[in-house]
């Protein structure tokens, strides 16, 4: 099991252990902060054609419908809304990560049993492909996992992602199905994903 605590907690966080806090209230506060940055529609016609690796990992490893929500926000960083309201838990300094990375933190609720292992593995795979490596580490809490990915597996994923991104940028109809894994739904911070 890959354990991932909140890496980029909000500045109002007194304790990084989300299980000790009201994470529903916290999630609501985070969402109210970022909603003004939400695009009115998914189209990339009039915005940068960039997809942050977290949004891709959510699409391919958690829930397509939730990925659509992630994609409705700027995919690049830095943004002042993030820098002014979130910190890097390792350094205690303001962070320059993207909004999708902040949203990923909200899925874990500080729970080591959160079903986000596939998302973290996919994020690692994107990083490995970018650096032409095949061995990487996922670190969370007190645990560190070394993962080896074959070139064939990396190339297969990148081919699927390339086709998906091409269709997304062309505003072609893309599937955004809700996950059938209801355990994932228990961790989702969206009240009503049917409206996305």
Image (tube, helix red, strand yellow):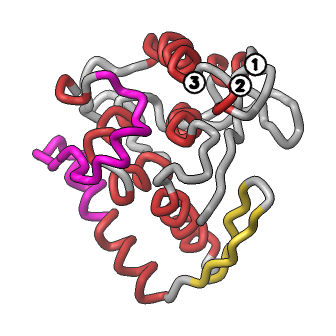
Q: Crowding at label 1, few (<14), some or many (≥20) Cα neighbours within 10 Å?
A: some
- Magenta-span inclusion, residue 189: yes
The CA distance from mark 1 to mark 2 is 5 Å
Residue in view at x 69 percent, y 77 percent? 146
Image vertical order of residue 83 relative to residue 64, above or below? above
Residue in view at x 32 percent, y 22 percent? 191
In this picture, residue 12 sits left or right of residue 195: right
For residue 86, which numbered disc appears in the image? 2
Element under disc 3: helix
Numbered range of the magenta stretch? 162-191
Mark nearer the N terminus (1 vs 2): 1
Q: Quadrant location of residue 47?
A: top left
* Label 1 close to label 2 by CB (< 8 Å): yes
Q: Quadrant location of residue 82?
A: top right
Badge 3 is on which residue?
23
Coordinates of residue 171 in the picture (x, y in percent): 17, 41
Q: So how many labels did they put on this image?
A: 3
In this picture, residue 107 sits left or right of residue 189: right
Element under disc 2: loop
Coordinates of residue 21 in the picture (x, y in percent): 66, 22
């Amino acid at each position: 099991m890959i354990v991932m605590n909140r890496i980029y907690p909000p500045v109002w966080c007194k304790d990084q252990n989300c299980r000790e806090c009201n994470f529903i209230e916290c999630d609501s506060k985070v969402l109210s902060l970022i909603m003004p940055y939400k695009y009115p529609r998914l189209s990339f016609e009039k915005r940068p054609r960039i997809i942050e690796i977290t949004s891709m990992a959510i699409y391919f490893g958690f829930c397509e419908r939730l990925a659509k929500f992630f994609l409705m926000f700027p995919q690049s960083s830095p943004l002042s809304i993030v820098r002014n309201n979130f910190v890097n838990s390792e350094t205690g300094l303001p962070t320059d990560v993207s909004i999708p990375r902040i949203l990923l933190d909200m899925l874990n609720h500080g729970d080591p049993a959160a079903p986000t292992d596939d998302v973290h593995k996919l994020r690692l795979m994107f990083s490995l492909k970018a650096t032409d490596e095949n061995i990487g580490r996922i670190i969370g809490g007190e645990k560190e996992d070394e993962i080896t990915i074959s070139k064939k597996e990396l190339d297969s994923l990148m081919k699927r992602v390339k086709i998906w991104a091409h269709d997304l940028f062309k505003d072609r109809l893309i599937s955004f199905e809700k996950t059938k894994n209801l355990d994932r739904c228990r961790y989702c911070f969206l009240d009503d994903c049917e409206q996305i």
